[in-house]
Image: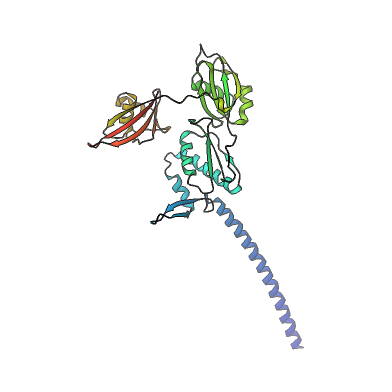
Amino acid sequence: MNHLLAMATATTSFGTACCLRRVVTHAFALSHSHNLRTNANLSFQRTLTSHLLSVSTSSDSGASKTVQASKGEVDVLLKGVGEKSVANEVKHVLEMAKRASLKREILHTNFLTPPVLKESMQVLEKLADIKALAQGGYPQAERCRISVGHPDELTSDPDVISALSITGNFKFEPCSHGDFLGSILGTGITREKLGDIILQGEQGAQIIVVPELVEFLMAALDKVRNVPVTCTKIPLISLDYEPPRTKSFKTTEASLRVDAVASAGFKISRSKLVDMISNGDVRINWIPITSKGTTIKSGDLVSVSGLGRLKIGEVNTTKKGKFAVELIRYL
C-alpha cells in the first residue's frame, strides 16, 4: 500500500511539474514576443537607423568605409543648422525620408523656405537608400517642394507643382509681390501651399501652387487689391521667368563682418546698415540677423529690405592681411 501511495504521489508531482513547465514556457514566449515588439518599436523610433543611414568615410589607404548611423548621429546631422526653427523643419523632412524608405513609397513636402530647402537637401545627401528631388517650377525658384523616396522608386520627377497665370489691367494700379501674396492668402490657403510669385508688370503675375488647389484658386481669386483678375492654369514650360540681371565688383575690407562688406556692396554708410540690422531689415541666407559683427563667407546671400540682394563671390586674403571680396549685386 505504501508503495502504491508513493507511486501516486510521484505521478502527481510529475504532472504538476509538467503543467508548471508549460505555463512558464508560455509566459516566457509571451514575454519574449512582447520584448520583440517593444524592441521593434524602439528601433523604428530611432530616427535614421543603421538600416537607413550610413556615413561614407575614407581610411588611410583611401578605401571607402560605411559607418552605420547611431541615434546620436541625427543630432550630428542637424548640428550645422544654426536657426532652431529651421532645424525643426529639417528634422521633419528627415523623418519623412525615413518613412519613405521604410515603406518604399514617395512622399512630398509642402513648399519650403529657402533656408529649410538648402539645409534639407544638404542633409538628405548624406542618407543611404534615399533619393531627394527639389522642384519649384523653374531653375532659380526659391521656394520648392522636396520629394523623397528609395532610389528604386523615385525614378522621375513627380507631378507635385502647378502654375497659374493671374491676369488683369494693372496699368493704372501696379501691384507688388505683397499685394498678390495677400490676395492669394486671403482666399484661405496657407503659405506653405504656395511657391514663388513671378511678377509680370502690367499683365499681372504667375504663381506656383500645389496641384490640388488649382481649381479652388481659379474660382476663388477674383481680385488683387482693387483690380479684377482672371486666374487660369498654364503649363510649367510657359512660366515667363527672366534670369536676374547682376553687376559684379570687388571691395577690400579689413574684416568679413556683414556691416563692412554689405555697406560697401549696397553703397550706403556703415552706420546706416548697422541701424537696419538693429531694425531686423538685414538677412543672410534669408535668416534675419541681429548682430553687426556677424561674418559672411563665399556663397552667402545678403538681402536688405528696400535695397535688394547681394551675393558674396570669391574671397581672397591680400598680402596686407585684408580681404578682397567679390560682390554680385542683383539689379
Residue 327 in percent (x, y) is at: 34, 29
Front one among 131 and 272: 131
Residue 215 in percent (x, y) is at: 64, 26
Front one among 151 and 31: 151
All told, the count of numbered labels is: 0
- Residue sticking out furthest to the left: 320
Front one among 305 and 297: 297
Does residue 17 show up?
Answer: yes
The answer to whether 104 appears left or right of 310 in the picture is: right
- Residue sticking out furthest to the top: 172
Q: Quadrant of the C terminus?
A: top left
Q: Residue at x 66, y 68 (%)?
A: 25
Residue 303 in percent (x, y) is at: 40, 28
**Corner quadrant of residue 65:** bottom left
Residue 182 in percent (x, y) is at: 53, 23
The answer to whether 298 appears left or right of 127 in the picture is: left
Does residue 274 show up?
Answer: no
**Corner quadrant of residue 251:** top left
Q: Residue at x 50, y 39 (%)?
A: 89
* Model colouring: rainbow
Q: Quadrant of the N terminus?
A: bottom right
Front one among 188 and 228: 228
Q: Vertically, is 64 above or below 327?
A: below
